[in-house]
Amino acid sequence: MIQTKTFTESPISRLNSFLSQIPGEDLGNIEPLTPDASTREYFRIGWENSTAIACVYPEPFARQEQSYLDVTNLFVAAGLPVAEIYEFSGEFGVIVHEDFGDNILRSVLERVSPQEKDDLLNQAIVLIAEIQAATPLAAELGSIASRLAFDCSKLSWELDFFTTHYFETFLGEKLSGADALSLKKELDEVARALEARISVLCHRDFHAANLMIDRENRLRIIDHQDARMGTGSYDLVSLLLDRIDAPPTDEWITEKQQFFLNERGKLNLPKIDATEFAAEFRLQTIQRCLKAIGTFSYQTAVRGKTGYAQYIKPMFEAVLQAAEELNRFPNLQNIIKNQIK
């Protein structure tokens, strides 16, 4: 059994120790890669006359409790396009998997034509429907993902994270007692309403930085280890509203929602009323975007990744738009208006 401990060796040292046990691998061919907002460290390494990606974790792990291994097994069984795992070691905290190259979808979307961008987003939306189709399989396999959920506790924790790190960490000030209480009451209401709509398997962080285009020009899913049960709209909100420069139009959102519902229909998933889905999408927009603002605030103020700050205002605008369209959460609306004026 692997004992819980803190590694004393550096990630690169542990990776070298791990590779030294594998005959024929080139220890000198290690290229550090830069993760986005991860506690894990990534390296491109030589592997069987080609390359692979080595993910080095901050702590050792047990195979049966390792979520990346577990969810990869689930997604592979469901036919979803994730990386093949080549080797792993819980002792060294290392997983080696297939190398998709360097074409992150977010970067690709910035340099292609509007039509190509739309086509790629639609391909990504198809993948969301396919992930949801794997919901029964997750339960059948007893996957970790089937036993976790965006329940009220998890959603409220994320919303509290927003409140703490936007106001206190990023702005350096606390909300007044009355504002804090009124906001907490409304955000708890958001969490309860979304908990009641848990129905499908979600990637949990399905945005354009967690999708890649491989060397054969195929769309691939990465960073799926936190998959869990949630609402039908969760991953779609994440894809369409992550790191926006301005809130998209209602017409565009409606078009993408309908495309998604049509894809679910092709997979014979239960029919969802378009009007009900639009309302759920707005509710999920509030939670997911506030959660993202909390992350961006933390990354900016604590980790010095100031590039995230530019997304805070437009994501607040998306939250405000959703709350206004729902005609709910007046205290939240007022607080946001004060922040973006």
Image (spheres, rainbow, N blue to C red):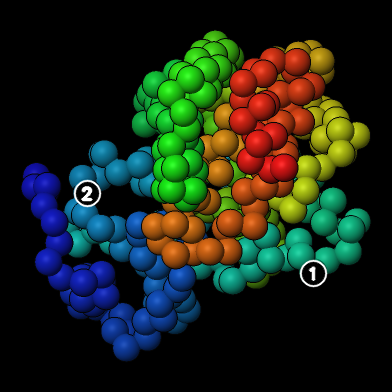
Q: Amino acid at mark 2?
A: Phe
Label 2 – label 1 distance at C-alpha = 39 Å
Residue bearing mark 1: 111
- Picture quadrant of residue 112: bottom right
Q: Is residue 215 above or below residue 201?
A: below
Q: Image quadrant for the C terminus?
A: top right
Q: Amino acid at mark 1?
A: Arg
Q: Image quadrant for the N terminus?
A: top left
Q: Nearer the viewer, residue 251 or 302?
A: 302
| N-term-proximal mark, 2 vs 1 | 2
Residue bearing mark 2: 61
Q: Is residue 311 above or below residue 64?
A: below
Q: Please state if 190 lies on the left or on the right of 8 as rendered.
A: right
Identified at 57% across, 36% down, the residue is 290
Q: Is residue 340 above or below residue 234?
A: below
In this rendering, does residue 285 appear at all? no
Q: Please state if 62 lies on the left or on the right of 329 as rendered.
A: left
Q: What is the x, y in percent for residue 319?
A: 68, 33
Observer-side mark, 2 or 1, equals: 1
Identified at 76% across, 23% down, the residue is 324
